[in-house]
Image (cartoon, rainbow, N blue to C red):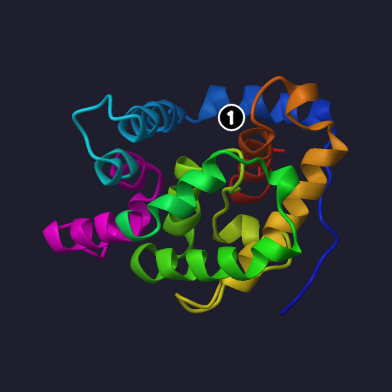
């Protein structure tokens, strides 16, 4: 597995990326909608199930994954089964932030991620886990993973890479002062920076 020196953006870099992201990426609306829907579904205040709320983002932010795959009843049932199986664990992670990620979490996170990526692929797994625990699980895509020296392998084998990415994200959050300094979720801010820098080449 290759490695590279992680990027540690300053707060001003995150702000610049945020404005660039909002100006050029209209799909942020779907992220905000899915985030609210998941929150309401978890509290039993939505007509949608948690899996249906997650699917809102998967069908927009992970559209390329479904170019040659069907998002049919069977696939939806697999997503629902994942969420039901791991719901207690996901609720616990939802109450935590990335700064609490530690060695004792790694085996659990690796297994959880690989279960999700077997159904959703490594990008869909990260997006789904982030929606379910947005302050704990970071987002990535193939370009971002490669940019951090973690090129993705076959589906179901990327848990160790994701844990390494979580360690990088934790250090990045700490370097900008975390949520207290930014006044919003640092994982979302860092993802916007990564997306602008590695996925789109806007920075």
Comparing 32 with 108, the one in front is 108
Q: Does the magenta stretch include residue 22?
A: no
Left or right? Give the position of 11 relative to 73.
Answer: right
> Mark 1, residues whose alpha carbon is within 10 Å: few (<14), some, or many (≥20)?
many
Q: What residue is disc 1 on? A: 21
Name which quarter of the figure residue 104 lies in: bottom right
Residue at 77% over, 40% down: 173
Horizontal side, residue 170 vs residue 198: left or right:
right
Q: Foreground residue, 137 or 196?
A: 137
Asked if residue 82 is among those painted magenta in the image, a careful observer would answer yes
In the rendered image of this protein, does residue 69 appear above or below residue 84?
below
Residue 129 percent coordinates (x, y): 48, 50
Quadrant containing the N terminus in the rendered view: bottom right
Start-end of magenta stretch: 55-83
Q: Residue drawn at (34%, 50%), measured in percent from left and top?
A: 63
Where in the figure is residue 172, as x and y percent of width and height?
80, 44
Quadrant that contains the C terminus? top right
Whether 194 is drawn above or below 22: the answer is below
Q: Is residue 145 left or right of residue 32?
A: right
Secondary structure character of the magenta stretch overall: helix
Which corner quadrant of the image does residue 72 belong to? bottom left
SS of the residue under disc 1: helix
The reply to whether residue 112 is in sight is: yes
Kindly identify the residue that appears in the image at 73 percent across and 24 percent down: 15
Q: Which image quadrant is residue 84 in?
A: bottom left
The number of numbered discs placed on residues in the rendered structure image is 1
In front here: 106 or 155? 106
Instruction: Let me know if residue 202 appears in the view.
Output: no
* Left or right placement of residue 156 versus residue 148 in this view: left
Q: Position of residue 184 (x, y in %)?
A: 66, 23
């Amino acid at each position: 597995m290759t490695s590279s020196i992680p990027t540690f953006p300053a707060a001003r870099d995150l702000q610049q990326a945020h404005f660039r992201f909002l100006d050029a990426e209209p799909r942020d609306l779907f992220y905000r909608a899915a985030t609210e829907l998941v929150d309401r579904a978890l509290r039993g205040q939505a007509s949608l199930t948690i899996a249906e709320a997650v699917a809102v983002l998967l069908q927009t932010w992970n559209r390329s994954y479904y170019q040659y795959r069907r998002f049919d009843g069977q696939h939806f049932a697999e997503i629902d089964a994942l969420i039901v199986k791991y719901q207690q664990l996901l609720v616990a992670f939802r109450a935590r932030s990335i700064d609490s990620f530690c060695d004792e979490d790694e085996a659990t996170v690796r297994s959880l991620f690989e279960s999700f990526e077997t159904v959703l692929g490594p990008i869909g797994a990260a997006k789904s886990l982030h929606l379910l625990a947005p302050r704990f699980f970071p987002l990535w895509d193939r370009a971002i993973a490669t940019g951090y020296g973690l090129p993705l392998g076959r589906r179901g084998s990327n848990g160790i890479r994701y844990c390494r990415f979580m360690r990088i994200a934790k250090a990045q959050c700490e370097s900008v002062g975390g949520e207290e300094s930014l006044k919003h979720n640092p994982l979302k801010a860092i993802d916007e920076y990564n997306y602008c820098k590695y996925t789109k080449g806007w920075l």
